[in-house]
Amino acid sequence: MYLPINLQSKFALFSEHWSPKIIAQMNNYHFKLVKIQGEFVWHTHPETDEVFIVLRGNMIIHFRDGMVHLSTGEMYVVPKGTEHRPSAASECDLMLVEPTGTINTGDAGGERTAKGDVWI
Amino acid sequence: MYLPINLQSKFALFSEHWSPKIIAQMNNYHFKLVKIQGEFVWHTHPETDEVFIVLRGNMIIHFRDGMVHLSTGEMYVVPKGTEHRPSAASECDLMLVEPTGTINTGDAGGERTAKGDVWI
């Protein structure tokens, strides 16, 4: 009846990159898992902060005037309205926390925009 | 200028149990770290869901009609208005996510109520 959400079991359910999957909802926020590798698009979320938590691997969040390196067990909050571009040289497993309806490409749109909410 | 938040480094800054420390804010939500051991009080958060993520160890969240066991790498969302009691037989490191101003003892109050916001 009461079942835990196991992060590794959820990661084992998919392999594609840059396609966040929802694993939990708290009020009007979603917790999402995503695998990333390579470079994403520059984008901004004008209406919300966005939380990155690295669960395995290494990534960089690029800003127009700097960057932050994140390794396993590290997190960062990208402030709303701040243009950023995530990247990872090797595959990296992340948890994202953001309001329901937040689009992965923010204001940038384009072909890498995830299509709707996918729960796993 | 851009610095990651390292969870293990933050846990190394304190040792007391049942006293959540804030490490990050996303919009009007706080990310908190807490070490727990033993049994907490029964309480309810009438206004909000509450997220538990186990970063090290094992814990149980008791409900009036059941319980959920959580181990390292597992999470659970306690729905708002649901009476619950966290416990851990051995020390367990958790991350909590909840709205700013959420009180650890919820509607129960009492001597184990954390005093104000503490950032580390």
Image (cartoon, coloured by chain):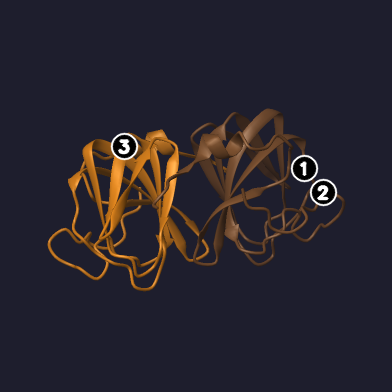
Chain colours: A orange, B brown
Q: Tell me residue B2's x, y (percent).
A: 39, 52
- How far apart are the two marked residues, 3 and 2, measured between alpha carbons? 38 Å
Is A108 situated above or below B60? below
- How far apart are the two marked residues, 2 and 1, measured between alpha carbons? 8 Å
Q: Tell me residue B25's x, y (percent).
A: 52, 59
Tell me the tag on residue A58. Answer: 3
Question: Where on the picture, by quarter, is residue B34?
Answer: top right
Mark 1 surroundings: few (<14), some (14-19) or many (≥20) residues within 10 A = some
Residue at image coords 14%, 65% = A110
Q: Chain of mark 2?
A: B
Residue carrying label 1: B40
- Label 2 SS: loop
Q: Nearer the viewer, residue B8 or B98?
A: B8
Tell me the tag on residue B115. Answer: none
The kind of residue tagged 2 is Arg
Instruction: Give the mark nearer the N terminus: 2 vs 1.
Output: 1
- Label 1 SS: loop
Residue carrying label 2: B112
Viewer can see residue B54: no
- Label 3 SS: strand
Q: Nearer the viewer, mark 1 or mark 3?
A: 3
Mark 2 surroundings: few (<14), some (14-19) or many (≥20) residues within 10 A = few
Residue at image coords 42%, 48% = B3
In the rendered structure, are the residues bearing label 2 and label 1 in contact, judged by CB atoms less than 8 Å apart? Answer: yes
